[in-house]
Image (cartoon, rainbow, N blue to C red):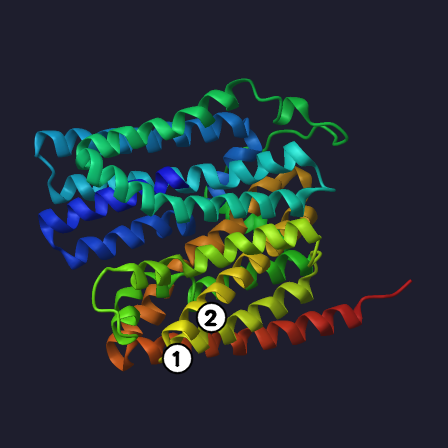
Amino acid sequence: MMADNIEHVISYWIIFQKFQSPALAGFAVLSHWLPFLLFAVYSGALADRFDPRRIIQCAMGLFMFVSLSWGVLFWTDSLEQWHAGVLLVLHGLAGVLWGPAAQLLIHDIVGRDHLQSAIRLSSTSRQLGVLMGPAIGGGLLLLFGPTAGILINALFYLPLIFWLWKAPYGPKFREGEPETPRRAMRGFQDIVTTIRSIASNPTIVSMVLLAGFASMFVGNSHQSQMPEFAHDLGEHGAGLHYSILLAGNAGGALIAGIVLESRGFLQPKPLTAIILVIVWCFSVAGFAMTGSYPVAVALLFISGFLNLAYNSMAQTLVQLNAPQEIRGRVIGLYNMSGNGMKAFSGVTVGFGGALIGIHWSLFASAMALLTVMVVLLSLTVWTRAKQPTG
């Protein structure tokens, strides 16, 4: 994740300097999230059928190829918009390729008993990468320039590639689970079949819906709108106060991982996850409307804390309840919903902001999500009440 964010810092800066194209900047966001919407289930099917270690290695290799390609284009001063478009798409495909496989491998490493703990730790490390990436990327850009900086960035993927070569995890090392036949991938039918397979499991259905609605209405769209929020809060340049706003969500998520993991708080339950999203809606809505900089930072921190808490819980519940033979596909479906739908948050918040202002669009999106979560909470309580006891 650190290398991922370093590449964003350097490549986005060069793209802006060379082309100054808002359309290309918008394409960068879409190319990052749309692959999850289109291909996450297929990526999960690959993880079901093949060794997740090798799939992750292929994804890391693709990340390296993209960084090296940026470096060559920067060095030769031959970057054109179509080059940037192709590399942005390849970067997005690498992201969706490694996501479900990595989650499946975590399950193999720790088993069911420690799964939530492992997911929290993994999410915490991802947030640490989100925090460190821009700082290190900016440092590489200043110290070495964009060409050498992004070539150095390619090296950060190597340790994981080498470790996975002989890591004693994956299908050949699974204990306590019967060997299941490898199911062939059947294109779009895989998505339909996976949905039908989990339709009778209210826990998985509710968590997939939770992740999808949270991403569609809000997601991380307010991060891309942070310059305008910072301006309205009195910060007119890219100084320390702006940087603190950018780091607010990631910092809250990082602390959440440490606190929740060290204390063992918030065991995975569907109702708890939904309530956490409801509280998250209030924190996002408060940030949207506050005119106080300290309050904005505090609400961003709380928002990041809650975001990690509900995301790690929802992902844990999905993995624990997914049938073993299609676990990768179910994880892919969750990724399709939780990550792929973030592409649409740019519509609800971004384009909405062009019509009614970014503050009101984010507030309205948070309130719309709140309404949906209250309905989902009611349906979950009703479903539990209908289940036979004893």
Percent position (x, y) of residue 197? Answer: 64, 50
Q: Which residue is mark 1?
A: 290
Residue 299 marker: 2
Residue 371 marker: none
Residue occupying image coordinates x 72% and y 72%: 381
Residue occupying image coordinates x 14% and y 34%: 74
Residue occupying image coordinates x 29% and y 41%: 137
Identify residue type, mark 2.
Leu
Q: Are marks 1 and 2 in contact (CB under 8 Å)?
A: yes
Left or right: where does residue 69 sit relative to residue 206? Answer: left
Residue occupying image coordinates x 32% and y 47%: 134
Work out whether residue 225 can be spotted: no
Identify residue type, mark 1.
Thr
State which quadrant residue 155 falls in.
Answer: top left
Left or right: where does residue 230 sit relative to residue 177? Answer: left
The vertical placement of 133 against 47, above or below, is below
